[in-house]
Amino acid sequence: MADTAVPLEAGAETAHRPGLLKRILFHNLPAKIAALPMMATVLVVFVGCTIWTVYYSFTNSKLLPTGKFVGFDQYERLFQTSRWNVSVTNLVAYGAMSLVFTLVIGFILAVLIDQKIRFESAFRTIMLYPFALSFIVTGLVWQWIMNPTLGLQGTLRNLGWSNFSFDWIANPRMVLFAMLIAGLWHGTGFCMVLMLAGLRGVDEEVWKAARVDGIPTWRTYVSIVIPMMRGVLITAIVILGSGIVRLYDLVVALTNGGPGISSEVPAKYVFNYMFSGGNIGQGLAAATMMLLTVLIIMVPWAYLEFGGKGKRT
Amino acid sequence: MSQTATMTGSAPVASGEVVEARGPRPKPFFTPRKIIIYSVLVMFSLYYLFPLYVMVVTSLKTMPEIRFGNIFALPQAPNFDAWVKAWTSACTGLTCQGLSPGFWNSVKITIPSTIVSIFIAAVNGYALINWRFKGSEIFFAILIFGSFIPYQVMLYPLVMITREMGIFGSLQAVILIHTVFGMPILTLLFRNYFASLPQELFKAARVDGAGFWRIFFEIMLPMSLPIFVVALILQITGIWNDFLFGVVFAGTQNYPMTVQLNNIVNSAQGTPEYNVNMAATVLTGLVPLTVYFVSGKWFVRGVAAGAVKG
Amino acid sequence: MQHSVSIKDLSLNFGNVKVLEHLNLDIAQGEFIVLLGPSGCGKSTLLNCIAGLLDVSDGQIFIGGKNVTWLEPKDRGIGMVFQSYALYPQMTVERNLSFGLRVAGMPKDEIARRVARAAEILQIQPLLNRKPANLSGGQRQRVAIGRALVRDVDVFLFDEPLSNLDAKLRSDLRVEIKRLHQRLKNTMIYVTHDQIEALTLADRIAIMKNGVIQQLADPHTIYNKPTNLYVAGFIGSPSMNFIAGTVDGTTFTAADGTKIPVGAYDFAAAPAGSLKAVLGVRPEHIFLGEDADDVPYRTTAEIEIVEPMGSETLAWTKVAGIPVTFRCSSDIPLNVGDKVTIGFDIARGSLFNAETENRL
């Protein structure tokens, strides 16, 4: 192969080595061409769009992203908007409850399923099917079940339990729990599958050893198995956490933010300001805050992951 | 009493004779432990099954029957009128064509998005494992990290990009977006799968003089059927269930089924027809549910694969 | 006399599959028993039954004279060591050793005394504050043994404890286990598929196949007087040479007509008349050249393959048309194609009934 990139003086040894630039470009050329969509996605979408959003969140863009630089004005306004503050509070409250309950219920169900029970696959199928459905379907069916007049409350009152009350969906103070019921219905099966995979990954001989040692089953779970499942737990927390931050469809279908603004969430705030509120700068600032939240979850996790890998080698 | 009996290895019986321990440990059919396990599982199963039951039952009732106010009751005369209306003539606030256009839009979105996203991800995974180049791992790391960024962060710039490309508000735009956001998880899936295949196979093919694409199509693809099935299930259900990208990028004419469904239930004027709403909900859930029940263990594999660390 | 461990008529089925069948085994106090066999022969299953980790389908198990058939593992007076070590990964070595005792509510000073003793015996004192992840394979297995040790029990069960270690460590730990047995003098039941481990460690070996004990005897008997063809073929590396034929009185006739006098063989019961039989001779019981002068059967054979092993040489040849290996000193120069005289030491050979496969 003729080598034009190397000057003649370089001598015979280097003359056969392609130049650095050429190596970067042409080494494994088909692989690089094949990976172009991935590189484009990473550079344009994940890096480019994110930076763009962060940058324009510092402008006063209204209908079009052309506004001038205004510093932290959008953020100041954001945190003076009660709807945003309610959204954030809701997300924190719902997120904490959802995370804890999903993990606890998922783990308990996985432990129960793991007890060499009959009809194991039937139980598993029943627990996971909601996860196959969309949040829209989930939201709508629970909206109907929790319908105060004709749903569960109405039915039980008609059946004679006249002071039965289940109007959470229409009650600003309880609406987050309504969301929780629907959210747990959708997501606990998934968590159960993760936990079950973790439980089944525990060396069977460890269980035998614990039995020979005379350690009760519950104690084996608490002192030996759960610490061994640290990796699965962290993975579950990260996946559930990033899902909670994104929470949007479920709210749209279940309550559409109501009653009033009592079940608003940040993702919905962003969407409304960007596409119907006509205040792009505000939407972008809110989106940037969501990004920040995810970074707060992700960075310690990534640190643990990479830190762990570094120690292992 | 039985506790002390087992301690000595023999159990006294009523007559006072001693039965020597022999064979399997005596196991009563009902133990408190078993009762607790099964009752908790059954309770949770009811929680999971109840909405499905309510959905189906309500959709088969007439409105007067529903207004009677018993969501547990079975329909007195099950009929599919609500299903027909949901499919053909339910109103979304703008038009009254039912869900059927949404269904076909979802088909038109799901099929190409699934094919394109899986193909690109398979090539990515293959290149990342077998044809590593400088920076390929960094791209992959950002890709995985990027999958955790909320979509809202990238949404507006993507609207501008697709508008520049002249495809905003069309099926192509939704397909592109699904391909982009499906890439992290699918690439991870294929990368891990190809990493689990014996590397000698790839080396042997290279020694035989096969190039990038020939190895991919003739060696790797034929061995990748299981992971393709997993990816297929993941993408079909994921894309069918999507709401956000459909509502933003597809344009009013191309709204997928989930968006149509939400409009029928939440934006419709006049008195709500709960039987039609539930029929529409069942119809929308039917495709992913079918995939779920047909695929069985594969769906579980897909779900768990998303959680496997790279 | 009271046996330390006694297994009576033990059977185990998984569904319709019979894993163990009417198995009987008596183990004396302080005896080192090795259960040896290929994978799937039921040896680990038997050990798990003794430990109480598997429920038996029928039969009884006695440990220290006590019927333990229905007892939980912790109440049986056993300690167990596993192939994968099965250490609790998030606990330090010290906690790994003491966890079972703490759960049982033992006084702290007694726990400390036992842990210290186990650590001293196994020489793992410097490791007490480390976690299993920071230990080598050999160290982990020592800790696993220590966990059995602190239980202060009469019976130790080992389930292929050295299989996960490399060859060097395996032979080191083998010696340590032997030393441990000599020091503690308690009963040990040891499962392995490695015949070297079995021959070196055992007081008695139980060779198992398809859930049945084929032969239970001391290593010397197992090696020199295998009770059937299976045991003869399983023990010994390289394995015993087998020649099929018929035996009539004191003459063995191979399939190709070669006659081998077997008058020197110590028949358990002399066969009446002609009988289809298999003659087995170990490679080291075939003598070369002058050494073969005094043995009952000599022949001339051509060397086909020579495998120098360092301390000795293994040579392949054919006798009666059947491939035969023999060992000789590595000092003797052997070349392919050499015609040599070899002789069978029939007195130390084995004869099996070809149909029942049992020793004659």
Image (tube, coloured by chain):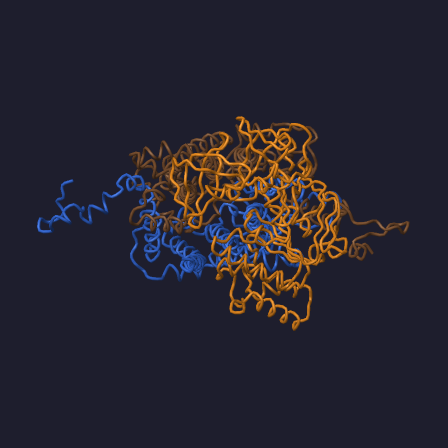
Chain colours: A blue, B brown, C orange
Location of the N terminus of chain A by quadrant is top left
Residue at the farthest left position: A9
- Left or right: C229 as drawn, with respect to A158: left
- Left or right: B138 as drawn, with respect to B60: left
- Residue B23 x, y percent position in the rendering: 75, 45
Q: Nearer the viewer, residue A301 or C178?
A: C178
Q: Nearer the viewer, residue A275 or A124?
A: A124
- Residue C21 x, y percent position in the rendering: 70, 40
Residue at the farthest top position: C256
Q: Is residue A136 visible?
A: no
- Residue C324 x, y percent position in the rendering: 49, 36
- Residue A303 x, y percent position in the rendering: 42, 59
Location of the C terminus of chain A by quadrant is bottom left
- Left or right: C167 as drawn, with respect to B159: right
Number of numbered callouts drawn: 0
Quarter location, residue B286: top right
Q: Nearer the viewer, residue B88 or B250?
A: B250
Looking at the image, is B91 positioned above or below residue B4?
above
Q: Is residue B85 visible?
A: yes
Residue at the farthest bottom position: C109
